[in-house]
Image (cartoon, rainbow, N blue to C red):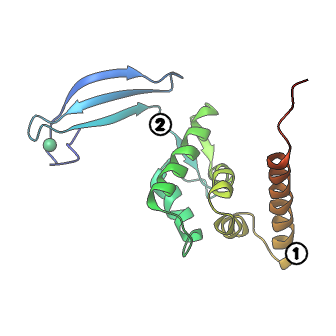
Amino acid sequence: MYCPFCRNRDSRVVDSRLQDDGSAIRRRRQCPECGRRFTTMETTSLTVLKRSGAAEPFSRSKVITGVRKACKGRPVTDDDLALLAQEVEEAIRSAGSAEIQAHEIGLAILGPLKKLDQVAYLRFASVYQDFESLADFEKAIGVLRAEQADAEQVGLQPAPTRA
Ligand SMILES: [Zn+2]
């Protein structure tokens, strides 16, 4: 494994541990050249099957690229996108399948993106779910409004009083 700091071709493992859910092994490595430490994760490979029938490895950066377009001009940071991609990958991996359909990734993106930014969510959903008319947007906005109203109602409920 190349050192991500100085590109040295060698590194040594200083610590290995299994993730709590058993889905990955986390290794702390140290570069003998520059002395810096970094973490690697060993997981089963996750294959994405595209509509064309082609298969490619799951890539967080592709998730980020897809979502970033929808977030143009929105107050969404690179950290937000990295976290979202991580959430998406964790959700997909937790399903426990080694192969997934490309459209399932889109589906896994919608939830976390809705929490992150509603405008970006609508943009992404309009492409992913093939919105064809204003009515499709109106429907999606209606769902967002209803969810928001529910959330506000929960927030307004008085704390339970004790007798
Ligand atoms: Zn190094």
Write the residue at 81% across / 67% down. 141
Identity of the residue furthest to the right in this view? 163
Q: Looking at the rendering, in which quadrant would you find the N terminus?
A: top left
For residue 55, say whether it is visible.
no
Q: Nearer the viewer, residue 68 or 75?
A: 75
> Could you tell me residue 134's position as x and y percent?
84, 78
For residue 136, say whether it is visible.
yes
> In which quadrant of this rendering is ligand 1 seen?
top left
Label 2 sits on a secondary structure element that is loop
Query: Residue 135 got which mark?
Result: 1
Image quadrant in which you'd find residue 73: bottom right
How far, Cα to Cα, is label 1 from label 2? 40 Å
**Residue behind mark 2:** 45
Image quadrant in which you'd find residue 69: bottom right
Q: Is residue 131 above or below residue 150?
A: below
Q: Nearer the viewer, residue 41 or 162?
A: 162
Q: Amino acid at mark 2?
A: Ser
> Could you tell me residue 124's position as x and y percent?
66, 66
Write the residue at 52% across / 66% down. 68
Q: Looking at the rendering, in which quadrant would you find the C terminus?
A: top right
Identity of the residue furthest to the left in this view? 33
